[in-house]
Structures are given as C-alpha cells and as structure tokens.
Image (cartoon, rainbow, N blue to C red):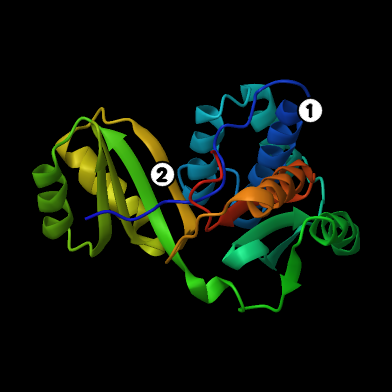
Amino acid sequence: MGRAYAVRKASIEKTGKAKAKLYSMYSREIYQTAKAGGTSMDSNVALKRVVERAKRDQVPSEIINRAIEKVNAGVDENYNNVRYEIIGPSGSTLIVDCLTDNVNRTLSDIRPILNKNNGKLGVSGSISYMYDHLSIVRFKGLTEEEVLDAMVLNDIEVDDIEIENDEITVYASAQDLFRIKEALLKIKSDLEFIVDEIAMVPKNTVKLSGEDLKSFKKMYNLLEEVDDVQHIYHNVENIND
C-alpha cells in the first residue's frame, strides 16, 4: 500500500514570531476544547489529545495550564471555527481551518494573500470533497503484521498503511483515532506516537513547478503566519522542494 500524505507543515521553527504563533494557536485550541468539554483530561478525551500534541510540539506547561485555568476561572472568550477552501495555481488546493473571535478580521487577513499569489476562495464544499477526513497515527516499534492483526482484532477498518524505514503510519476513519491508539498500546504499552491526529488528507496530489510552485509556497507560508489560522491542508506533494 502507500498513500501520499500532504498535510500541514510540521517543521514550524520554534523561534521568534513562529514560536509565538505556535503558542497562541495551542492556547486557543486548548481553551476552546476545555470550555466545550470540561477541564478534566480524564473525562475530556479531546482535551487530552490536544494537550499531548502541544507537549510534542514543545509548548511549555505554563502555556497549557494557563489556557485551562482561564476556563476554571470563568474567563469567557468566544471563538468560531471557520474553514476556507482555496483554489491555487495549476490544480493545487488548500483547506485552511481557523479559530477566530472576529471572522471579518480573519477574512481581511487571508483575502489579500490569495489575491497576490494566484489563489481564490472556493464555496463551501468545493474543495473538501477532494479530501478524506482521517485519523493518522504514526509510530515505531511494531511490525506491519502486528499492526494489521491489532486492527482486525479490534474491528477497526483501515483506509491505508504506509511503511517508510522503520515508521508505520495508519490511516483510518476520523472517529477511530482513540480506538487505534488503544489497540496498539495493548501490544506495546510504552509505544510512543510520532503523529496522532485527525486531518484532511487529499485523495490525489499534484506536483507544481516554476512560478506556480513559487506562488504556492509564498501563499502557504503567508497563510501560516496569520494569527487565526490553526491548520492548513493541501494537495501539493513537492512543496518542500
């Protein structure tokens, strides 16, 4: 098997402006998740997942705890989840998920970036149908046979499995993320997950070149700098070239 995995760039530099953006992004997401489902990670599994992800991205504990304590203290901040579906050059697409307290401000930040880099907004659903909403779990330390047996025994339908060097990536239904992790931990209790997230994965990818690739990279990097942007998914497989 093998499926191209083009999702938001993971190599955000942990310095300066990028570090501040990373901390702000997680602070909002942790606050919103705790506000929606409670501040106990024992009962709020979604909160536990985002906190684990923040720790893997080296977000300091004080940032995490401060976001949770705001909920306990009754601080009332209101954020909306907004998705922008974007058409880029030469068949490229992006899905940009934002968490914002001012939709007009977010749109005014995003629209000029698209206008200057051969991008345009699509209507809702015009791009997302080209993506699958999947759980993605990546790890080391198990064989493909062990992983497949675990999925079968726990009645988890796998969309795909990728093996690269000694890393295995499992793709499955978005609602099965925790079941996948539990099934794997039954085999190896100290298994560490390199990636465990729910993401939009493109059904097909494109390669860009020349000015198209240059424009796409610039658009992507500028979108990533927008404060309200949480996640960016795209279908360009050679963005890091």
In this view, which residue lies farthest toward the front?
210
Cα–Cα gap, marks 1 and 2: 26 Å
**As displayed, is residue 231 above or below residue 13?**
below
Residue to which mark 2 is pinned: 196
**SS of the residue under disc 2:** strand
Residue 155 locus on image (x, y percent): 17, 63
Q: Is residue 31 left or right of residue 149?
A: right
Quadrant housing residue 23 = top right
**As displayed, is residue 148 above or below residue 204?**
above
**SS of the residue under disc 1:** helix
Residue 210 seen in the current view: yes
Q: Nearer the viewer, mark 1 or mark 2?
A: 1
Residue depicted at x 66% and y 58%: 97
Choose between 17 and 42: the one closer to the eye. Answer: 17
Q: Quadrant of the N terminus?
A: bottom left
Residue depicted at x 82% and y 54%: 113
**Identity of the amino acid at label 2?**
Asp
Choose between 92 and 11: the one closer to the eye. Answer: 92
- Residue 17 got which mark? 1
**Identity of the amino acid at label 1?**
Lys
Residues packed near mark 2 inside 10 Å, few (<14), some (14 to 19) or many (20 plus)? many
- Residue 55 got which mark? none
Choose between 67 and 217: the one closer to the eye. Answer: 217
Q: Quadrant of the C terminus?
A: top right
Quadrant housing residue 108 = bottom right
Residue depicted at x 22% and y 48%: 183
CB of mark 1 within 8 Å of CB of mark 2?
Answer: no
Q: Is residue 162 left or right of residue 209?
A: left
